[in-house]
Amino acid sequence: MIPVTKPYLPSREKLDKYIDGIYEREWLTNNGPLVQELTKRLEEYLGVENLLLVSNGTLALQIAYRALGVSTTNRDEKPEAITTPFTFIATASSLKWEGVEPVFADIHPDTWCLDPKNIEKAITPQTKAIVPVHVFGNACDVEAIDDIANKHDLKVIYDAAHAFGVNYKGESLLKHGDASILSFHATKLFHTIEGGAIVFKRKEDLETAKKMINFGITGPDVIEELGINAKMNEFQAAMGLCVLDEIEENLKARANVWKRYEKGLKRFLQLQTKTEGVEYNYAYFPVVFENESALEQKVERLQDSGIHARRYFRPSLSEVTCLEQNSEQVISESLSRRVLCLPIYNGLSESDCERIISFLRPNI
């Protein structure tokens, strides 16, 4: 069986050494030494400042909304945030959970990211933020989005769950916006089993968020504000440090798979257009079929052969009833019915890649 992805498992010997240290110190959580070390190493590797580790990527979004004043505890207020319907449910459900109404704007037909042309017409007096997604690690039009945000005095929180290590015009893509969030879920390019991070533009926002992730506690017998438990623990950080040690090997292996797919399929299937200036991380390989029927036929053939691809993202969030959105988003809804992510992970053999390619070519 070939899964759509496999968690990267680093050296067991190295992980055991980190775990031995945890047992010796008996310091399991509350900003332990491994969390501190991983914070510093990730800032260095990614080329960013003001990075805060948290327990998962969804809480990273929720903490970012609160730290930046997008969400509110006032039930009489109805803040809104403009976001994309072509994304994982957590992007929108985290807004809803925080009392912020997600307002969808359609995506660009080639890059699949939130189209700036559709943002401005969705702005209302209740709009507090823009929440774009670097879809499959492809960079949004960050300059255009910044211009709109500055014009209307809006916060920008990038869902960069897929964009670990992605550079744009020679610098980390995570530097854009008021904050960017990362997911370190086990299926991601870089992971801590579960986990996530927020990269803030301003240090004062980082300091605010630090209080929030530990119940608002700032010292013995001192609680300054309402908070939640969103801390990363030492065992998560240990896995992250091991995975980071081997990240270049992992990237190289995924890049080889990605390039083999591209060479074998670009003449037959639509691929995502990369934003100019992006240095990609090879985290995903999505392909687009002419129609849903053609996709379903290929998926069935793949599954019959033990190959599991994923229809990602389906459905378009504009069609999810519990989000209570009535606006039609034509491009997102069409794409969500025709897009398929192929297996990609370190360890996928050349022969398996070629077998997958052969199933997807016409008349096979």
Image: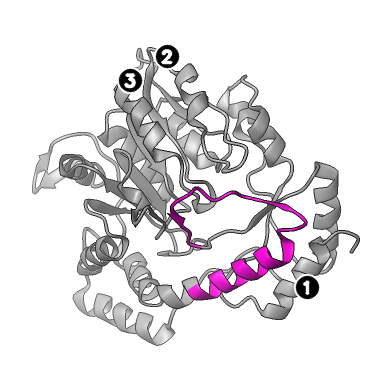
Q: Which residues are magenta?
A: 252-281
Per the image, is 289 magenta? no
Q: Is residue 269 magenta?
A: yes
Please name the amino acid that badge 3 sits on: His
Residue that mark 2 sits on? 124
* Residue lying at 62% horizontally and 19% vertically, measured from the top left: 326
> Are there few (<14), some (14-19), or many (20+) residues within 10 Å of tag 3?
some
Kind of residue at disc 2: Thr
Left or right: 24, with 355 as reference point: left
Q: Residue at x 24, y 43 (%)?
A: 201
Q: Position of residue 98 (x, y in %)?
A: 39, 30
* Disc 1: CA contacts within 10 A as few (<14), some (14-19) or many (>=20): some
Give coordinates of residue 304: x percent, y percent: 85, 65
Query: Which mark is on residue 135?
Result: none
Disc 3 target residue: 152
**Foreground of the two, 209 or 258:** 258
Figure check: 165 above or below 260: above
As shown in the figure, which amino acid type bears the numbered disc 1?
Arg
Residue matched to label 1 = 355
Does label 3 or label 1 sit earlier along the sequence?
3
The answer to whether the residue labelled 3 contacts the one labelled 1, judged by CB atoms less than 8 Å apart, is no
Question: Image quadrant for the N terminus?
Answer: bottom right
State the CA–CA distance, disc 3 to disc 1.
Answer: 51 Å
